[in-house]
Image (spheres, rainbow, N blue to C red):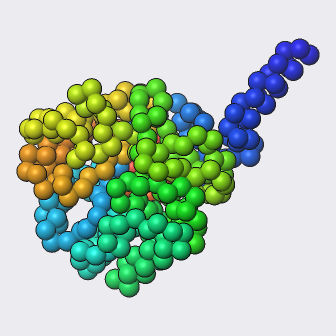
Amino acid sequence: MYVIAAVLTSLALKVAAQGGCDPASNCQLPNCRCFLDSKVPGGLNLTDVPQLVVLSMDYVLNEEYEPLYNQIFSVSNPNGCEIRGTFFIQDKGSNLGLVKRYADGGFEIGINSIDGTVPTSEGDMVTMMKTVKQDLKTAGIDEAKIKGVRLPQLSSPGNTEFIAMGNNGLLYEAGCVTSQYDQQLNYKWPFTYDYPPTDNLCNTGTSPNIKFPGKWQVLVADLTWKGNKCPTPSGCNGVETKKDAFDLLYNNFASHYEGNREPYILVLDPVWVKTDYKLEGTIQFVDYLRAAFNDVWVVTADQMLQWVQTPTKKADLNSFAPFQC
């Protein structure tokens, strides 16, 4: 009797520590995942878990950057489909016809901003997301496939941003950079705000502190480079050669791959890809992933989330519908 009581007390304390979130009862996939749930989605054995890598690009997409990005996305995943990534689009300065061609080619399109600035009020935030989404829709992009947002400068206005996401039918946020959960032992799987964490997770701004059921957070872990932390490759100092660029990207990848296989989220921007040796190091990194590993998949943020929602063993991924061409 005492053993049973002790077990029940332990479970109750665990649920309480997660703000009432219990993955065994009130927060289950595909639409809910607890922030403090450190287990692999679906309870898969680590040996069955693929390493998912998400290459995400911010700001403008136009003819200047098209040939640069195309060089990165030139290899295929294990199922033979070409790798793809997610563009978070800044409206002003982008060629939306080109954005449409990328969308037709299997890339995911998300929302960044109208002009590279962050709205300061809830009303302006709602309007910004609505405007960019409508412009993308007018360009011929399927509205149902516009699911994610990442604000300029990786800003995180917390509740304001998530209210605007709800008003615009968006599913996830991918701009919260964290230096709290950026080590091999504590990387985070994406989670929902059905039961929000009590602490602020984001380095710039705040994470939500009220419930947003079914809305996902894709945390961006700080990178480690030469003993320092940086939110993006372009924010890392001392990257001076192609080898430096490769080592930065690969060493942080290895920290995920050799740990619990949480998704590796990379934020690429025009500053990074316009520097020749940094672009060359990025291409070398992506090419090496595909040549050296048969359990690494380079996917969009939406594809990654679909895997989290419906966990599938790596041996079965060749027929996993969200990863098909």
**Image position, residue 145 (x, y; %):** 45, 70
Q: Residue furthest top?
A: 2
Vertical relation: 228 (above or below) 153: above
Residue 260 vs residue 126, the one in the foreground: 126
Looking at the rendered image, the quarter that the C terminus falls into is bottom left
Count of residue discs = 0
**Image position, residue 71 (x, y; %):** 15, 56
Tell whether 278 sits left or right of 190.
left
Vertical relation: 279 (above or below) 291: below
**Image position, residue 101 (x, y; %):** 26, 74
Q: Quadrant of residue 163?
A: bottom right
Vertical relation: 29 (above or below) 15: below
Q: Residue furthest front?
A: 120
Residue 146 vs residue 274, the one in the foreground: 274
Residue at x 14% of width, y 43% of height = 281
Tell whether 148 sits left or right of 229.
right
**Image position, residue 310 (x, y; %):** 55, 50
Q: Residue furthest bottom?
A: 138
Residue at x 75% of width, y 29% of height = 13
Vertical relation: 315 (above or below) 213: above
Q: Is residue 4 visible?
A: yes
Tell whether 168 sits left or right of 23.
left
Residue at x 16% of width, y 64% of height = 65
Residue at x 17% of width, y 66% of height = 66
Residue 239 vs residue 248, the one in the foreground: 239
Q: Is residue 314 visible?
A: no
Looking at the rendered image, the quarter that the N terminus falls into is top right
